[in-house]
Image (tube, rainbow, N blue to C red):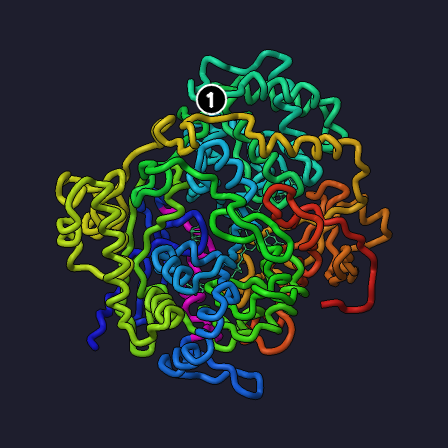
């Protein structure tokens, strides 16, 4: 095979939701230098240490590059692809044909960043025929997805903060200066926040910690964890009582404005301030500032999702934006128009059905959302005997052993599976339990377009970076891995992958032809030269909102056009989309959906509840990405996993800097080094998640030498859940902290 070996090329960073444009230099097949692309239409020269470390991530000697098979002795040996698929062919079908539910699938965060999984994971899921599908969505975004689904009709087509044009930005539970943002794709967010302040705008950050983002804000509101819904109701009560709502700016399609304001009346600032742990006057000033700004918007993220009242909080964020007349206006909350289309661009063909609670889990009867079961069901569905028990598992780009709550139960569950396949580039806490590990190829061999994250772009742009290299011998494209697994699950293991791909493309072509209103033949001819994810992407782009409609609009968007414009194409700032964007059954926005309103009594009851002395919350780290970059990009500071505690709490417990402490929740105890830190509000302690790189069989030499403490060992997966979505409460875990000389994992 002749391998094209260019010296340099463009690459959209696949690591986080910022999707920065990068310029990559190669020496043969090795990335030797990465720089931000100053001409990228969205990121304009922004990047971070992780993106610039792409070479180190790809070149990490611990990365798996060859399929691995479990040996009789419990270790792994390298195998050929044929051997690996042969083993899967021998062992997987039993769990599919006999009892399709008995094979579960977990797909992790990186799967949302790659075209391969975006387009082909559905084939595997369909072939396995299981409803036992899990992903981090149920620990990350479901409360926000559900709130947006109820208000606007789709879980993914969320409203976005129009950051670059707003005058008042209220951020709740997000630290974009470190995370680079989530459910908002705004690369270089620190410049955007700085620009907001330079144009005279106001930034308010609601967070129990004075984070880096709070440091650059005009006002930091150090809220007690889990009380955002009360805070927002307090703000709304001021807006109601002082007549600050702007009905004249609320779109005609909104129902329930009066009811929403009336609902807030009982939650006046003096009634909620103590529970929120903040001054009632702060609530009043946020209400007046927000309502009085020419354009204002609130943005909520995981701090508001991974908590007890997540759906309520995320619903109230939208209510606040809407009643103050900031929906669908520049500087307010707006909707992107994603180039490859999606649920909120496709026409509705039948009455939309809420993608929530359409079925329930076997053991506990917890509700499905968007086709998946809550992650808190994962361990019990494997460990609880009875018909329909999960006995086999396929993981794709995920580390549930560290990312899901109650790691102890998760690892017990992984340990009793009868068969497990992982598609992953590391032998880590999860994949060490697999029978077969299949490695994805280097990032340089992939094309990149963010089909999903384009829903969150704060500017309408279209970008694509093509593969820089062909696959080398011994490498297999991830989409081909997925299709081979699908073929085995379907009982047709010898079916050529290309044939299945043609079938997938034929379905996509019919859909594209329907969207555009032309013959399928015309569509198939137009994409005839392409295969794999590129063909499917071309179909989506050409039938998308800017598409060339397969030649009917010759100036429209095609994949070829993006290949000719590697810095991307700018379609301008977000434009109003209400009511066309709505996919609710009646095409309107009901501000008071029964499902969330019915959760208010639980919130009301929490107002007078005694708060535990110490609540554990989570923090992200600049060089980390959940659990998986610790090996390739070691943290520079040995104390990164420390338990942070406020000075008064440390004094009260008689603890000093550097103490070894036992952190105990109702589930278990882990140990950590203590650091006193005045950015935390009293009553709150903090640790990062994704650590705990310990136990046998890991092939992550650097991170295993500084394993850190496993946050998620402490988190309950049974009773302490967000009531509507069964999301775990990662933020606000009651703990005790005591000095110790013992080591707990
Ligand atoms: N460097 C780095 N970047 C990342 C990641 C990473 O691991 N490392 N992970 C990526 C992923 S998968 C995601 S989903 C995004 C998440 O991106 P963000 O949503 O920005 O996540 P965090 O940085 O964890 O910020 C959450 C904030 O919520 C605060 N908080 C905790 N409890 C509460 C509460 O009850 N109320 C309020 N108001 N705040 C609370 C925490 O103190 C924290 O500052 O980041 C992405 N980017
Ligand atoms: N306590 C606590 N827990 C949390 C969070 C928190 O804030 N606090 N955050 C949650 C959130 S927001 C998320 S998104 C989840 C993340 O949960 P997961 O997605 O389960 O965990 P990651 O650590 O992101 O693991 C990614 C895996 O993908 C593999 N990988 C990387 N690139 C590729 C690729 O190209 N192909 C394949 N096949 N594999 C690849 C890595 O080796 C790693 O095993 O964690 C959640 N867990
Ligand atoms: S901010 Fe995110 S997308 Fe940008 S370089 Fe860093 S990791 Fe990559
Ligand atoms: Mo996430």
Q: In the drawing, does residue 550 fall left or right of residue 627?
A: left
Residue displayed at 76% across by 61% down: 669
Residue displayed at 39% across by 83% down: 83
Quadrant in which the C terminus is drawn: bottom right
Residue 46 forms part of the magenta stretch:
yes
Along the line of sight, which residue is nearer the eye, 524 or 547? 524
Residue 31 visible in the snapshot: no
| Residue range (magenta) | 45-64
Q: Quadrant of residue 384?
A: bottom right
Along the line of sight, which residue is nearer the eye, 113 or 97? 97
Callout 1 environment at 10 Å: few (<14), some (14 to 19), or many (20+)?
some
Q: In the drawing, does residue 626 fall left or right of residue 128?
A: right
Residue displayed at 82% across by 67% down: 741
Q: Which residue is mark 1?
A: 254
> Residue 169, position in %: x, y?
52, 30
Callout 1 secondary element: strand
From this view, report whether residue 643 is shown above or below residue 603.
Answer: below
> Residue 693, position in %: x, y?
61, 68
Quadrant in which the N terminus is drawn: bottom left
Residue displayed at 24% across by 39% down: 546
> Residue 654, position in %: x, y?
86, 52
> Residue 701, position in %: x, y?
56, 75
Residue 62 visible in the snapshot: yes
Residue 436 forms part of the magenta stretch:
no
């Amino acid at each position: 095979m002749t391998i094209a070996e260019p010296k340099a090329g463009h690459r959209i960073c696949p690591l986080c939701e910022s999707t920065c444009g990068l310029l990559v230099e190669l020496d043969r097949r090795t990335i030797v230098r990465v720089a931000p692309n100053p001409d990228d239409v969205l990121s304009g020269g922004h990047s971070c240490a992780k993106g610039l470390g792409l070479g180190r991530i790809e070149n990490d000697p611990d990365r798996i590059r060859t399929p691995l098979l479990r040996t009789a002795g419990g270790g792994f040996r390298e195998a050929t692809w044929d051997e690996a698929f042969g083993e899967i062919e021998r062992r997987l079908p039993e769990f599919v044909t006999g009892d399709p539910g008995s094979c579960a699938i977990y797909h992790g965060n990186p799967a949302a960043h790659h075209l391969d999984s975006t387009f082909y994971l559905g084939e595997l899921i369909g072939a396995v025929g299981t409803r036992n599908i899990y992903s981090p969505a149920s620990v990350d975004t479901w409360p926000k997805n559900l709130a947006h689904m109820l208000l606007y009709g789709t879980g993914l087509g969320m409203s976005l903060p129009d950051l670059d044009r707003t005058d008042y930005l209220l951020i709740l539970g997000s630290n974009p200066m470190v995370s680079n943002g989530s459910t908002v794709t705004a690369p270089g967010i620190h410049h955007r926040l700085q620009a907001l302040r330079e144009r005279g705008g106001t930034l308010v950050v609601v967070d129990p910690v004075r984070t880096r983002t709070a440091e650059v804000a005009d006002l930091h509101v150090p809220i007690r964890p889990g009380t955002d819904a009360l805070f927002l109701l307090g703000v709304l009560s001021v807006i109601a009582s002082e007549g600050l709502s702007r009905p004249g700016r609320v779109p005609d399609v909104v129902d329930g404005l009066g009811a929403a304001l009336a609902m807030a009346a009982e939650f006046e600032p003096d009634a909620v301030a103590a529970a929120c742990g903040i001054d009632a006057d702060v609530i009043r000033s946020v209400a007046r500032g927000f309502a009085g700004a020419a354009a204002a918007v609130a943005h909520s993220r995981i701090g508001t999702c991974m908590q007890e009242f997540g759906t309520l909080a995320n619903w109230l964020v939208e209510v606040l934006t809407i009643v103050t007349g900031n929906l669908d206006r520049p500087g307010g909350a707006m909707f992107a128009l994603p180039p490859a289309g999606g649920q909120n661009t496709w026409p509705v063909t039948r009455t939309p059905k809420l993608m929530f609670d359409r079925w329930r889990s076997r053991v506990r009867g917890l509700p499905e959302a968007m086709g998946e079961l809550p992650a808190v069901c994962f361990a019990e569905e494997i460990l609880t005997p009875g018909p329909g028990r999960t006995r086999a598992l396929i993981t794709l780009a995920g580390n549930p052993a560290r990312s899901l709550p109650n790691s102890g139960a998760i690892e017990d569950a992984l340990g009793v599976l009868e068969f497990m396949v992982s598609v992953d580039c590391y032998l880590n806490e999860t994949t060490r339990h697999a029978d077969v590990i299949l490695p994805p190829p280097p990032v340089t061999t992939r094309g990149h377009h963010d089909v999903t994250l384009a829903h969150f772009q704060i500017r309408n742009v279209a970008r694509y970076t093509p593969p820089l290299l062909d696959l080398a011998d011994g490498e297999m494209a991830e989409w081909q891995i997925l299709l081979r697994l699908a073929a085995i699950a379907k009982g047709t293991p010898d079916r050529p992958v290309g044939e299945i791909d043609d079938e997938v493309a034929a379905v996509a072509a019919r859909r594209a032809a329907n969207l555009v209103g032309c013959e399928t033949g015309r569509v198939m001819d137009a994409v005839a030269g392409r295969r794999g994810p590129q063909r499917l992407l071309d179909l989506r782009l050409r039938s998308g909102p800017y598409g060339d409609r397969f030649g009917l609009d010759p100036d429209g968007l095609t994949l070829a056009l993006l290949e000719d414009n590697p810095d991307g194409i700018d379609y301008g700032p977000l434009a109003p989309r209400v009511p066309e964007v709505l996919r609710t059954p009646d095409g309107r926005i009901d501000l008071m959906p029964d499902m969330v309103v019915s959760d208010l009594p639980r919130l009301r009851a929490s107002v007078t509840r005694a708060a535990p002395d110490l609540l554990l919350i989570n923090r992200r780290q600049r060089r980390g990405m959940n659990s998986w970059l610790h090996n390739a990009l070691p943290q520079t500071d040995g104390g990164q996993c420390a338990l942070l505690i406020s000075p008064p709490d440390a004094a009260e417990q008689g603890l000093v800097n550097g103490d070894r402490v036992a952190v105990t929740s109702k589930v278990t105890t882990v140990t950590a080094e203590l650091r006193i830190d005045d950015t935390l509000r009293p009553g709150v302690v903090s640790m990062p998640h994704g650590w705990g790189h310990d136990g046998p069989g890991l092939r992550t030499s650097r991170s295993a030498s500084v394993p850190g403490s496993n946050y998620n060992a402490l988190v309950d997966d049974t009773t302490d859940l967000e009531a509507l979505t069964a999301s775990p409460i990662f933020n606000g875990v009651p703990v005790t902290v005591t000095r110790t000389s013992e080591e707990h994992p």
